[in-house]
């Protein structure tokens, strides 16, 4: 079921999680529940392109320390050599800077989305219609998955006549006979 407020985020994450699980689960697909922790760890510690940060860093304010780094100290762990008090002080400073990191990630995300939108909109041709023009309307909702019944059914309704033209490419349509009023449509 689609939940409009989430804007498809859960479905997008589930698709990513499934692709990660396919890479982790090799021989038997029955042990996926044992490997889901590894897949989630990989997702949380991988830098995301839109935010240019890891989800773990955006939640906790620091990059994750891999379990291997605890057993074999890496350069990052070896250089620190801090006492517990210094470590706690640095941790609190990083937590205070976390809001700024999140705002920066939000700005990067907005810039990334603007770039994607600009690239997509290059291919869109703006269209405008005048009163009394004949138009076709897209049949809604368009469901492209599981289309088993009548695959030859048209994606368009109409023709309709433009009765009124509003701003932002919105139109009031009526049937050709002029009797039936169709809900307002937008052109893209």
Image (spheres, helix red, strand yellow):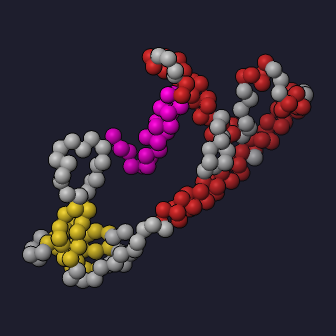
Look at 62% across and 48% down and name the residue there: 49
Q: In the depicted view, which residue is nearer to us: 141 or 98?
A: 141
Q: In the depicted view, which residue is nearer to us: 171 or 133?
A: 133
Q: Is residue 97 left or right of residue 109?
A: right
Q: x, y percentage for residue 179?
A: 9, 74
Look at 18% across and 44% down and name the residue there: 149
Q: Is residue 26 visible?
A: yes
In the rendered view, would you say 154 is above or below 28?
A: below
Number of numbered discs overlaid on the protein picture: 0
Q: x, y percentage for residue 137?
A: 24, 66
Quadrant hosting residue 107: bottom right
Q: In the depicted view, which residue is nearer to us: 81 or 18?
A: 18
In the rendered view, would you say 79 is above or below 130?
A: above
Considering the image in quadrants, where does the N terminus appear?
top left
In the rendered view, would you say 82 is above or below 146?
A: above
Q: x, y percentage for residue 158?
A: 17, 67
Considering the image in quadrants, where does the C terminus appear?
bottom left
Q: Is residue 33 visible?
A: no
Q: x, y percentage for residue 108?
A: 64, 55
Q: Which residues are magenta?
A: 1-22
- In the image, is residue 15 part of the stretch drawn in magenta? yes
Look at 57% across and 28% down and name the residue there: 39
Q: Is residue 52 left or right of residue 89?
A: left
**Type of secondary structure dominating the magenta stretch:** helix
């Amino acid at each position: 079921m689609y939940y409009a407020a989430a804007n498809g985020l859960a479905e997008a994450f589930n698709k990513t999680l499934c692709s990660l699980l396919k890479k982790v689960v090799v021989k038997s697909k029955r042990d996926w529940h044992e490997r889901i922790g590894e897949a989630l760890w990989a997702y949380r510690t991988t830098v995301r392109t839109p935010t240019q940060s890891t989800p773990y860093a955006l939640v906790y304010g620091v990059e994750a320390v891999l379990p291997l780094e605890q057993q074999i100290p890496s350069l990052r762990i070896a250089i620190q050599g801090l006492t517990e008090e210094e470590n706690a002080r640095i941790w609190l400073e990083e937590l205070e800077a976390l809001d700024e990191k999140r705002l920066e990630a939000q700005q990067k995300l907005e810039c990334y989305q603007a770039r994607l939108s600009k690239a997509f909109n290059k291919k869109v041709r703006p269209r405008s219609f005048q009163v009394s023009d004949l138009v076709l309307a897209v049949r809604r909702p368009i469901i492209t998955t599981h289309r088993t019944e009548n695959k030859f059914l048209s994606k368009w309704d109409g023709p309709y006549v433009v009765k009124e033209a509003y701003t932002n490419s919105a139109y009031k349509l009526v049937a050709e006979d002029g009797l039936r009023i169709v809900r307002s449509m937008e052109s893209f």
